[in-house]
Amino acid sequence: MKRILMVCHGNICRSPMAEFVLKDMVERKGIADEFEIASAATSREEIGNPVYPPARRKLAENGIGCSGHHARQITRGDYDHYDMIICMDDNNIRNTMRITGGDPDEKISLLLDYTVRKGQQVADPWYTGNFDATWRDVTEGCEGLLESLGYRQ
């Protein structure tokens, strides 16, 4: 089983979008039982909150639900549990490494590192209000991630 944790600042926009998009992709491919997929925040600001309404609407527009999600903060123990910790931007990487104590096993990466846009950041709709751009980034990143794991479209 491949255990993947998506991480952003508050765990109410980008990382839950990535979590639920990836869950949808593996479900449609019939490989959901090969994965454990979750998401977390680097901050404590939104702990307990559901997916931000515009992010929830963007997922719903694409036939993806996100009920039951409540923001949580990443823990040091998550580093041991998950095989891959995938961050949305460089600040998330820096804060994840601070919380987990570094990345000795090289588990931490950016979502867009799995695309031709290696090193780029997933657009943060909290600041831009552009959930379409975030949707495109997340979808492209999740497709690239699955391809990197040997699952073709």
Image: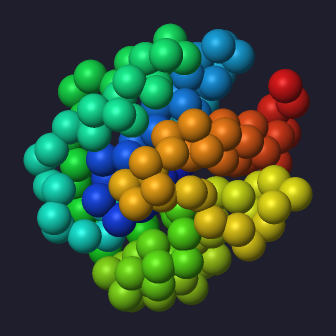
Vertically, is 145 above or below 57? Answer: below
Vertically, is 65 above or below 2? Answer: above
Occupied quadrant, residue 151: top right
Quarter holding the N terminus is top right
Residue 146 appears in the picture as rendered: no
Percent x, y of residue 43: 25, 70
Residue displayed at 32% across by 53% down: 11
Percent x, y of residue 142: 67, 41
Residue displayed at 45% across by 73% down: 92
Residue displayed at 39% across by 81% down: 95
Percent x, y of residue 44: 17, 67
Residue 123 appears in the picture as rendered: yes
Residue displayed at 24% across by 62% down: 73
Q: State left or right for residue 17 relative to residue 152.
A: left
Vertically, is 46 above or below 23? Answer: below
Percent x, y of residue 111: 64, 57
**Residue at the front extreme of this rendering:** 129
Quarter holding the C terminus is top right
29 or 130: nearer the viewer = 130
Q: State left or right for residue 46 relative to residue 91.
A: left
Q: How many numbered callouts?
A: 0
Look at the image and name its color scheme: rainbow
